[in-house]
Image (spheres, grey):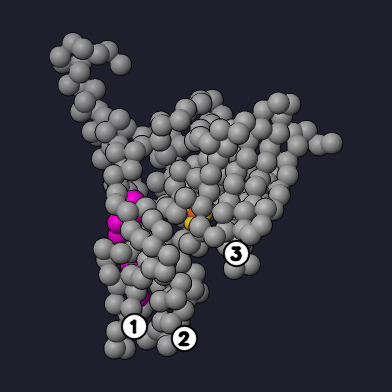
Amino acid sequence: MAFPARTKDFRPPATWTYTIKVLNHQRNLEYNGEKCVGCGLCIHACPMDGKVISWGTAPGERILVDVEKCVHCGVCAYFCPAGALKLFINGEERIELKEPADEIERHSLPDFKGETLAHKETGAPIRKYLRGSLHVPAGLDEAAKRAAVAACPTGALELAGDGLAVDEHKCFYCDACSRATGDRIQPRRTLLLVDMADGISPVVKRIIERLMDEQAAARIIKGVDQYKARDKAKALLEGVGSQ
Ligand code: SF4
Ligand code: SF4
C-alpha cells in the first residue's frame, strides 16, 4: 500500500470523501455536491495555487479535488460560502491550516464580517464575504445571458431589456456567471469582508492575492500592514510591547 494512503470514496446521493491516512491519523475532506452552488471560490482559496481543486464536469460533482496533491488543510472548507466542503480530522470536524514552517490552529483564520444570502431555489444560506463589481460586456448574446441568469446561485442576475440587471446586494462576486458565459462576464473582487484587526498571516495574504482583483489585493495587504505598524508603534510608545 502507498504511504500515506489516499482515497476518494463516493456516498450516494452526492457526497465524495477525499481521505489521507497516516498510521492512526486520518483527515477527510468531504464534498457535498447537493450543497455546492458552483461558485468556484474554493479553487481560488486553496493554498496549493490552483493545483488541487478544479472544475468538475458532472452536474452533481461541480468541483474535483486531486487527492494525490491535497494537503487536507481545510482552507477551501473555510472559504466555501455554501458549506459544501468540510474537513474532519480523526472524525472531528475542524479547520486547520498548515504552513511548511508554521501551524495555524483552528480559529486563526480571520473571522468573517459579511452577510448571509439565500439560494434562489432552496433558500439555503450562502455566505457573502466579498464585494466588488461585475463587468457585463455590451452585446452579450441571448443564450449567454440566459446561461448566466440560470447559473447565478442567488438570483442576482435578471434579463432586462437588451442587457442584464445585476442586484449588487445579492451578488457575492463568484465565478458562476463568468464560467457560464465563457469568461465574458467578469467579476472584480475588491473588498474582503473579514476581520483583519490582528493582521494577516502569510497564507491568508496569498489567498487574498489569488481571490481578489490585483490592485485591490495590494491595497488590502498594504492597509493591514500599515494598521499593524501603527499599532506596533503605539504599543512601543506606551511601553506595553516590544515586538
Ligand atoms: S466554494 Fe463550495 S459552493 Fe463554491 S464551488 Fe467550491 S465547493 Fe462548491
Ligand atoms: S451575478 Fe454575482 S452571485 Fe450571481 S453568478 Fe454572477 S458573480 Fe455570482
Q: Mark 1 or mark 3, which is nearer the start of the sequence?
A: 3
Disc 3 residue lies near ligand 1 with CB under 8 A: no
As helix, strand or loop, the secondary structure at mark 3 comes to: loop
Residue at the disc numbered 3: 60
Can residue 16 be seen at all in this image of the molecule? yes
CB-based contact (under 8 Å), mark 3 and mark 1: no
Residue 58 image-quadrant placement: bottom right
In this orientation, which residue lies closer to the viewer: 119 or 169? 119
The answer to which of 18 and 238 lies nearer the viewer is: 18
Circles 1, 2 touching at the beta carbon (< 8 Å): no
Residue lying at 61% horizontally and 61% vertically, measured from the top left: 61
In this rendering, position of residue 152 left or right of residue 54: left
Q: Is residue 135 above or below residue 9?
A: below
Judging by the rendered image, the residue that carries numbered circle 1 is: 159
User: Magenta stretch?
Assistant: 128-136
The location of residue 169, given as percent across then percent down, is: 26, 63
State which quadrant residue 187 falls in.
Answer: bottom left
